[in-house]
Amino acid sequence: MSGTDTIILIFIAIIGASIGSFLNVLIYRTPRYLNIAYPSSHCPHCGNNLKWYHNIPIFSWIFLQGKCAYCKEKISLRYLVVELLSALIFLLIFLKNGVNSYSLLLSLTFALLLALSLIDFEHKAVPDSINLSALTLSFFTSPTILQNFINALLLAGAFSLLRFYVSYYVSLKEEFYLKRRLKRAPWLKSYFPQPVMIEAMGEGDIIVAATIGAVLGIELSVIAIFLSAFLAIPASVFLKVSKKEAQLPYIPFLAMAFFTVYLFDEKFNALLEWFING
């Protein structure tokens, strides 16, 4: 690798980390319905406005030792992790595709999905503003814009059907369990006057599926969705064993599977061809 290539990669990493710094603003403010531009960056504990040198991606957190420069309250490690992951996303995408506008749009798409994943993990809900922005960018991540749009529609439709079937199955199973309980304790009936309806997947998951379809195409998208379900199994089992009532956020697993399949698309294509043709 030449010196020029190294400088370019460093520049790309800096851009990625800077985008990560903005993602931290989105992650904190958007779910709380706060303006992402005003007021300027400030400590959520003491309210003091931060200086420009307090906002240097990655380095400021390290030099401040993860504490506010004014009140010395701890700054969440999440801020550093998001900036590092965003820089890594940009580096891997540009190394795979080269320096071009498509790499930039892809990097931004995956960066927004990183923000969505953390918001979904914390709040169990995702802002449509970020989700639709990622979807819109995904249409333009390759020259085949119309085909990307069609693939997004197909995946959104397929995921919507999957959502209906899975929701019906889960609701039916829960209603059967509830009826057994009501036989043993009829007095509970007044607390459950309506049929059980459980949404197994959120609408945000459908939009993410459309984004996956726009970037990966139909075949690889199917692999990514199956991989996301596989990645979610350990977390699902943990919640069940620990008997926690917490809802499992699915977008982080969709995003991880999406990024993995994209990075290793040639290997997954070879696997798919082997599976079909033997």
Image: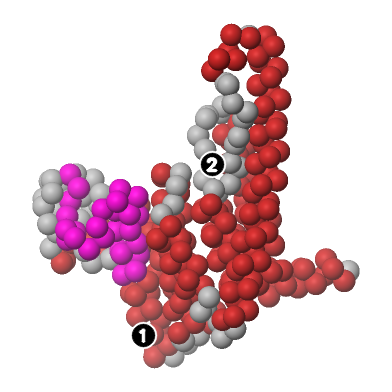
Instruction: Residue at 23% x, 67% y: name it.
Output: 56
Give the distance between the C-alpha atoms of the residues marked 1 and 2, in whole angstroms.
41 Å
Q: Say which amino acid is labelled 1.
A: Ile
Are discs 1 and 2 less than 8 Å apart at CB?
A: no
Residue picked out by circle 1: 7
Residue farthest to the right, as pictured? 278
Q: Say which amino acid is labelled 2.
A: Leu
Q: Is residue 39 magenta?
A: yes
* Mark 1 neighbour density, 10 Å: few (under 14) some (14–19) many (20 or more): few
In the image, residue 195 sits, relative to residue 51, either above or below, namely above
Q: Position of residue 164 (x, y in %)?
A: 66, 47
User: Secondary structure beneath disc 2?
Assistant: loop
Q: Is residue 55 magenta?
A: no
User: In the rendered view of the protein, which quadrant contains the C terminus?
Assistant: bottom right
Mark whose residue sits in front, 1 or 2: 2
Instruction: Residue at 35% x, 50% y: name it.
Output: 31
Q: Position of residue 89 (x, y in %)?
A: 46, 69
Disc marking residue 190: none
Q: In the shown orientation, is residue 205 left or right of residue 266? A: left
In the image, residue 30 sits, relative to residue 84, either above or below, namely above
Residue picked out by circle 2: 248
Magenta residue span: 17-45
Name the one closer to the observer, 251 or 90. 251
In the image, residue 219 sits, relative to residue 62, either above or below, namely below
Q: In the shown orientation, is residue 117 left or right of residue 189? A: left
